[in-house]
Every structure is written in structure tokens, then in C-alpha cells.
Amino acid sequence: MIETIFYILFLSQILLFSVYFPNKIYQRMRYVITHYPCNQYPKLYPQPIENYHRFHGNYRLANWLIAAAGLVILTLSIVFNNKGEFIEPQVLVWLFFMVQFMPVMVIELSEFSQFKMMRTVDRSSVRSATLSPRNLASFIAPKWLYVALITLLIAILYGFYLEDFTISIEGSAVFAAGILLSVNAFFSGLIYWNLYGKKLNPHQTEADRQKVITVAIKSLVFISISASIFLMVTLSIKEYQLHSLAPLAMTIYLQVIALFSLGNSIGSIKVDELNFDLYKKGSLL
């Protein structure tokens, strides 16, 4: 029964992260290139338009290939499991998740290059940063920051509780606390960079940037909360010898990450609500 649920969740991971979200992202990219053509919005395309068409096609193809590979892996897992050779499924779904995330990383990296070329090609409408100070509470309700902090502390204390508050370098509690604190330190750095770092898109309006920052900060805070909960679940599975539940916990956790990252971004930032006027030819806003 548990294995059947795992297969269903793994299939959900394949469809969610290699079909549904990639298709949404592809549609957004095509919407921009269709509704804001290069002859009217030249500042949006520092490269030849053919490069964008090729990039979009390769992105879609890569995700379809990953989805197909996932279905093959799922089928093989079922076959091997039926023979009693089911091996570390939680490791399998994690590694596959990393592969699924690669096209998204390619998009993120390509945006850095895109914005750099925008800044180099045309500086006529480059916007300066707002002079009004940014406050973290303006982008996310303080209660969620408290929830993230409290959940983090509870997770760390829970780990030490399971080991009778014995502090040992070789113990799971110290290792888990180190990982959790490192992850949250990294998230804090990303939040600080979003708030006070250099604006990447030179033509982006302040209102649009506020939307992007809000989505980024909320995603990081919610993922932080999820990581703390996942740690407690993982420690409980290990403590109470519930190893059969580990694959389920991993697949659920990965899909929560997908929902809080890509899902939140796609649902909160509507392409047709962004201001593209600054990309028009001769715009000096």
C-alpha cells in the first residue's frame, strides 16, 4: 500500500515538475514574444529573435525528455520492486528532482546574461533604484517570519530531544541543526540580496520589481518552514524505524518546494500585468 502511494506521488512529481509547470513557463515566454514583438519592443530583445525561438523550443524539448525519462524510471522501479529489488527510492526521487530542476536553472542563468546585454545595448531607459528604504515587513507579513523562526527552533530542539539533549559531533541532531542553520543562513542572504542588491533588469519599473521581490521572499520563507517540518519528519522516521515512509516524505517535500517556488511565482506574477512600456523603441520613462 505504501509503495503504491509512493508510485502515485512520484508520478505526480513527474507531471508537476516536468509537464505542468514547464508548460506554464513555456506559455509565458511565448506570450511575451507574441504580444510584445521585437519590432515594437526592441529593448526586450538584445539578441536576434531567432535565439529566443530556439531557446524556447529547446526548453520545451528538454522537459519532455525529462518527463519521458521519469516515466521510464517509474516503470523500472515498479518492475524491480515486484522482484524485491526496490533500492533507495528517496534517493531516486531526489536525484530526479535535481535533473528536473536543471531547465529552470538554465532559465535563471540565461536571465542574468539577458539583463547584462540589455544594460550594455541600450541605457536610454535604465531605471535608477528607488530612494525609499525597503522594509522586510512590506513584502511579507511579520507573522510568517515568526512562524519560520519558531519552526526552526522547534526542529533543532526536537532533534536534540530525540538524543536526550546529548551534544555529540557524530550525532544526528548536531548534523541536522548545522544543515538547517546553513540553509536558513543562505535563504537570509538571498532575502537581503533581493531587498538591497543591485537591480538586474535595467528597464524594470519599481512596481514590477516590488512584485518580484515579494514572490521571492515569500517563497524563501515558506520553503524554510517546510524544511524545518521535513527535518522533524525525517528525524522521527529514523528514530521510530518508519523507513518505509521515507520515500513518501521526500516526494511530498519536493512537491511542496515546487509549489512554493514555481507555483508561487507563476500564480502571483501575471505576465499581462507587467509594465512593458519601457521596452518600447524610444521610451524614456
Image: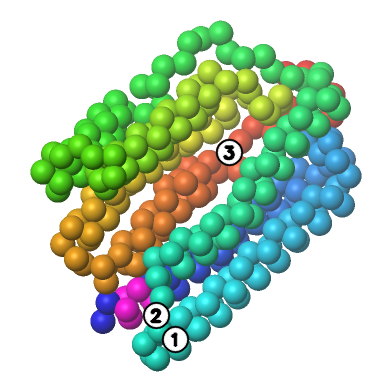
| Circle on res. 188 | none
10 Å crowding of disc 1: few (<14), some (14-19), many (20+): few
10 Å crowding of disc 3: few (<14), some (14-19), many (20+): few
Residue sitting at x 40%, y 91%: 83
The residue labelled by disc 2 is 86
Callout 2–callout 1 Cβ contact below 8 Å: yes
The amino acid marked with disc number 1 is: Phe
Residue sitting at x 42%, y 47%: 260
Counting from the top left corner in percent of width and height, residue 11 is at 45, 73
The quadrant in which residue 91 appears is bottom left
The residue labelled by disc 3 is 273
Counting from the top left corner in percent of width and height, residue 3 is at 32, 79
Q: Nearer the viewer, residue 73 or 68?
A: 73
Q: Which residues are magenta?
A: 3-8
Q: How far apart are the alpha carbons under marks 1 and 3?
A: 49 Å
The amino acid marked with disc number 3 is: Glu
The quadrant in which residue 113 appears is top right
Name the main secondary structure of what is drawn in magenta. helix
Q: Nearer the viewer, residue 261 or 180?
A: 180
Callout 1–callout 3 Cβ contact below 8 Å: no
**Tag in front: 1 or 3:** 1
Q: How far apart are the alpha carbons under marks 2 and 1?
A: 6 Å
| Circle on res. 80 | 1
